[in-house]
């Protein structure tokens, strides 16, 4: 069976048993700020397990794209060192949400493995939680596994938890015995092969998790009213077992990519050593790169983009180990697209974009290596001058972390000079960075992302949004929090978070910022709402994304259970409504003019402005921006009707609705249509007709990351104000130039030309002055070791004049060395020039490097001419005098 066969037979098996086959979720987790990437099949069902969402079919199965780049066995630098660890992998899984339980899960797993896939029964082992007698009984009565191969283990091996609190339960794992020859610890004294024994002979194939408890804050377990099943099986691993090959990289899913890479170089896979490591790294990382870009991630210096950048650059570096000197990863990505495009159509849809992003980033990495090389050479020169032979670890780490300069490459470069790297210092700096990253991850996890700490309520605290055009609403306060802790009341002056049963306040989502306003009681108490967000609120037996009003008690007291009147800032909401609505039109226009590979990559919708990020390679020409602005305004003038309709997610996608980057969608979604040109999934606030937007005005377009552009714009009154300000500015410029507005450009061009003419005449005068000074200076040259050496301090000369003077003096000397110095305020400028016949004996750069420290600076250049600057002009004469000592 091929890997594709294994995937399809798994899905077909569970489809025949009433499971809905759901598509893989994106690698970018929707609505979960605590995760960088989707790292398990259950991620898209997390809210179902927590009771915050329900599904029409309680059975599901899929093959989920996963990316793991941290943790004990997933250190990026270790991937490729063995034959079974990965960054990207596929997780086969089947789920039951309150439907079947242990009996069916165990019986079906055994049936699939042994009856359909024909794995030898005497090579399979089952593990269960130490007290899970029910699972043991299922294995004994529903399968024909040997009872001696049913083993009990404690919580470390066979108990699954989502977190410190929440849903959890025992699990049963199925392991396969690959034979004594698969053991990778034969040389370890005292080692004995066993299930969970730490060697590669017995490996886990399938984990069946039985979610039957909820762990509370005290650590106590409570039976859930509904019990769930969550299983996971790595496609790469089970495919390798079914194909009878020694490791995951030998199975066709990855071997096909390795075979393609062999065609790009003279090396071959299978000989062992660093060559095999390089092939495995490129295969694994090439797959991860293609899938990650297809799901909207772009290389950057933070978050997911930084992970992508690290993976891509590591793969590029290992390509050099195979002798591949030119950019090649876009071709590997193309192989991945061909290999996996049938199972994951998004790869084919975004093929051009994937290959272009990879190509641009790989070229950029080559430039980065050049910059890092220059910095490394500077550091090496300092060590040579100081007669030291060890590069500090923190310097090596900065080269690695900031410039992407690999440690092993740093060591190779320095080896020629007999300089070693302080590896212990490097590892310490690396450990400190990882500790900072873990702390940041813990902070994000404990807070549910940015904003207030994760909230815990004594009772159910869900909240409903009243609607787009509701500006005032009466409701009841269901929860009050101060400092993250629930309280009965918040008094005047307190910073608090308030939850009500139904609210007109829109919570920040889909790029649109949250509403502001006030919450009041009949007696006159008032709570000023500074922001509105969706936050995870937990209570006994449940959790939900709840609309939370953040602010301050301005007068009186706000109590749980009290009736309140909520009033939003209407002008602010309406302004945000215009900006949000126009992002839909802008998205449609960009896709129409630039191609359907354009996708939203983020947005900010505020009352005063909008920002729209989208995927596209390269800047947009001014003429194209004008066309885009004109078409957006044309759709506004259409005054097209804007409608919204709720429907099933799958139905919305079938009808052509576009989903926005990073948003989370349930089974039921809201579809917003504008005329016949835009259909998108969106829960934000919108106008009733496009004409309500009034005017759209672009403020600028720029790049924010590799392959991601940003448009900033204004609408409505904000756009009109911008036009008026520009008109006023143009009028004022016309008055200064003493002419009508339409003649402004012509008059400015005339003035600029006049300025250029004056600067040219000044430069000519300065050149003549330099020439006359040169004639006077030549007579001051001294002979040092048979070489004419001239040093001089000159005044009233800029950089260009100093270079011209040095050239003239060199020419007049015929053969010799010229070193000049000049002051620019308090700063010093030094320049050295060497005639061509002396370059083999003396280098201008070396001369400059030895005298520049006297003025507090540094510099360099070519052997024939080099310059340096420094902050201490008072020591120019001392630096010039040192030249004769340097050349003696």
Image: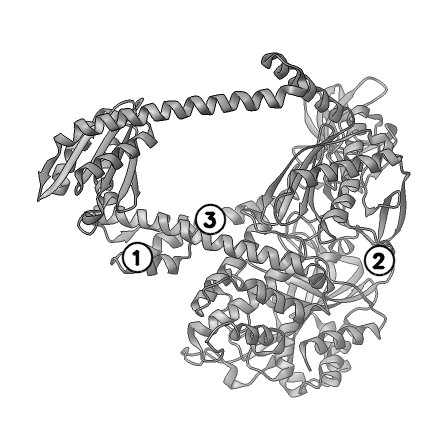
Q: Position of residue 260 (x, y in %)?
A: 57, 74
Measured in 3D between alpha carbons, the distance from the residue under mark 2 to the one under mark 1, in whole angstroms, is: 60 Å
Q: Where does label 3 land, which residue? A: 433
Comparing labels 3 and 1, the label whose residue is closer to the camera: 1
Q: Where does label 1 land, which residue? A: 414
Q: How many marks?
A: 3
- Disc 3 + disc 2, Cβ < 8 Å: no
Measured in 3D between alpha carbons, the distance from the residue under mark 3 to the one under mark 2, in whole angstroms, is: 41 Å
Crowding near pointer 1: few (<14 within 10 Å), some, many (20+)?
some
Q: Residue 133 sits in which quadrant?
A: bottom right
Q: Residue 507 sits in which quadrant?
A: top right
Q: Position of residue 662 (x, y in %)?
A: 70, 48
* Residue at the image position 75 percent from the left and 31 percent from the top: 488
Relative side of 382 to 782, left or right = right
* Residue at the image position 46 percent from the left and 65 percent from the top: 318
Measured in 3D between alpha carbons, the distance from the residue under mark 3 to the one under mark 1, in whole angstroms, is: 24 Å
Q: Where does label 2 land, which residue? A: 55
Which tag, 3 or 1, sits closer to the chain's start?
1
* Residue at the image position 74 percent from the left and 76 percent from the top: 109
The residue tagged with tag 1: helix, strand or loop? helix
Split into 4 quadrants, where in the image is the N terminus? bottom right
Relative side of 872 to 253, left or right = left
Q: Looking at the image, what colour scheme do you see?
A: one colour
Q: Is residue 131 visible?
A: no
Crowding near pointer 3: few (<14 within 10 Å), some, many (20+)?
some
The residue tagged with tag 3: helix, strand or loop? helix
- Depth check: 74 or 796 in front? 796
Q: Residue 19 sits in which quadrant?
A: bottom right
- The image shows residue 73, relative to residue 197, as above or below, that is above
């Amino acid at each position: 069976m091929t890997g594709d066969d294994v995937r399809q037979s798994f899905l077909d098996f569970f489809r025949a048993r009433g499971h809905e086959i759901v598509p893989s979720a994106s690698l970018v987790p929707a609505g979960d700020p605590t995760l960088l990437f989707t790292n398990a099949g259950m991620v898209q069902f997390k809210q179902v397990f927590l009771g915050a969402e329900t599904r029409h079919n309680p059975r599901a199965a899929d093959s989920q794209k996963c990316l793991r780049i941290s943790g004990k066995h997933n250190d990026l630098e270790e991937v490729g060192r063995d034959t079974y660890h990965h960054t990207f992998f596929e997780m086969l899984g089947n789920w039951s949400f309150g439907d079947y339980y242990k009996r069916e899960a165990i019986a079906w797993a055994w049936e699939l493995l042994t009856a359909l896939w024909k794995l030898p029964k005497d090579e399979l082992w089952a593990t269960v939680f130490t007290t899970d007698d029910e699972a043991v009984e299922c294995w004994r009565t529903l399968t024909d596994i040997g009872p001696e191969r049913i083993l009990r283990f404690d919580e470390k091996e066979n108990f699954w938890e989502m977190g410190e609190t929440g849903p959890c339960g025992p699990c049963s794992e199925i392991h396969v015995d690959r034979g004594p020859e698969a053991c990778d610890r034969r040389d370890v004294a005292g080692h004995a092969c066993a299930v969970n024994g730490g060697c590669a002979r017995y490996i886990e194939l399938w984990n069946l998790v039985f979610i039957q408890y909820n762990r509370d804050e005290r650590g106590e377990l409570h039976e859930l009213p509904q019990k769930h099943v969550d299983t996971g099986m790595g496609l790469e691993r089970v495919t390798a077992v079914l194909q009878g090959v020694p490791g995951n990289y030998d199975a066709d899913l990855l071997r096909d990519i390795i075979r393609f890479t062999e065609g790009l170089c003279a090396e071959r896979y299978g000989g062992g050593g660093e060559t095999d490591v390089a092939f495995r790294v490129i295969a694994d990382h090439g797959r991860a790169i293609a899938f990650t870009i297809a799901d909207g991630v772009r290389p950057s210096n933070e978050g997911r983009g930084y992970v992508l950048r690290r993976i891509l650059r590591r793969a590029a570096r290992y390509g050099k180990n195979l002798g591949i000197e030119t950019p090649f990863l876009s071709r590997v990505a193309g192989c991945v697209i061909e290999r996996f495009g049938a199972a994951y159509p998004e790869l084919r849809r975004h093929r051009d974009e994937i290959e272009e992003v990879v190509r641009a980033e790989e070229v950029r990495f080559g430039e980065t290596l050049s910059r890092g090389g220059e910095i490394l050479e500077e550091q090496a020169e300092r060590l040579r001058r100081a007669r030291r032979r060890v590069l500090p670890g923190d310097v090596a780490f900065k080269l690695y972390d900031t410039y992407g300069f690999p440690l092993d490459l740093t060591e190779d470069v320095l080896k020629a000079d007999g300089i070693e790297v302080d590896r212990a210092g490097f590892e310490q700096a690396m450990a400190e960075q990882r500790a900072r990253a873990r702390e940041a991850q813990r902070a994000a996890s404990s807070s549910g992302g940015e904003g207030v700490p994760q909230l815990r309520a004594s009772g159910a605290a869900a909240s409903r949004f009243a609607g787009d055009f509701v500006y005032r609403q009466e409701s009841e306060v269901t929860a009050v929090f101060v400092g993250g802790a629930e309280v009965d009341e918040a008094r005047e002056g307190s910073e608090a978070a308030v939850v009500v049963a139904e609210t007109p306040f829109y919570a920040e989502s889909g790029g649109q910022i949250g509403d502001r306003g006030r919450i009041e009681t009949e007696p006159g108490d008032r709570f000023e709402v500074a922001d509105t967000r969706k936050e995870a609120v937990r209570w006994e037996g449940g959790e939900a994304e709840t609309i939370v009003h953040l602010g301050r008690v301005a007068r009186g007291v706000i109590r749980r259970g009290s009736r309140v009147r909520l009033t939003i800032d209407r002008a602010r909401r309406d302004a945000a409504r215009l900006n949000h609505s126009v992002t839909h039109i802008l998205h449609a226009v960009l896709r129409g003019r630039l191609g359907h590979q354009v996708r939203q990559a983020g947005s900010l919708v505020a009352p005063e402005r909008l920002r729209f990020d989208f995927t596209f390679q390269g800047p947009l020409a001014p003429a194209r921006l004008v066309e885009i602005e004109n078409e957006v305004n044309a759709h506004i003038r259409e005054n097209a009707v804007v409608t919204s309709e709720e429907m099933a997610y799958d139905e919305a996608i079938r009808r052509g609705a576009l989903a926005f980057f990073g948003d989370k969608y349930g089974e039921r979604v809201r579809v917003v249509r504008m005329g016949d040109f835009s259909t998108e999934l969106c829960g934000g606030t919108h106008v009733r007709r496009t004409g309500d937007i009034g005017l759209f005005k672009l403020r600028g377009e720029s790049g924010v990351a590799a392959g991601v552009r940003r448009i900033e714009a204004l609408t409505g009154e904000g756009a009109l104000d911008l036009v008026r300000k520009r008109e006023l500015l143009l009028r004022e410029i016309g008055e200064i130039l003493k002419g009508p507005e339409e003649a402004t450009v012509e008059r400015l061009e005339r003035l600029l030309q006049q300025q250029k003419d004056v600067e040219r005449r000044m430069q000519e005068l300065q050149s003549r002055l330099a020439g006359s000074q040169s004639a006077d200076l030549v007579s001051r040259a001294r002979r040092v070791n048979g070489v004419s050496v001239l040093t001089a301090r000159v005044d009233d000369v800029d950089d260009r004049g100093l270079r011209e003077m040095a050239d003239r003096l060199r020419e007049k000397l015929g053969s010799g060395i010229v070193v000049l110095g000049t002051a620019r305020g308090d700063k010093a400028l030094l320049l050295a020039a060497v005639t061509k016949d002396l370059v083999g004996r003396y280098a201008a750069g070396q001369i400059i490097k030895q005298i520049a420290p006297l003025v507090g600076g540094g510099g360099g250049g070519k052997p024939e001419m080099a310059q340096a600057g420094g902050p201490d002009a008072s020591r120019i004469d001392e630096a010039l005098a040192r030249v004769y000592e340097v050349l003696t």
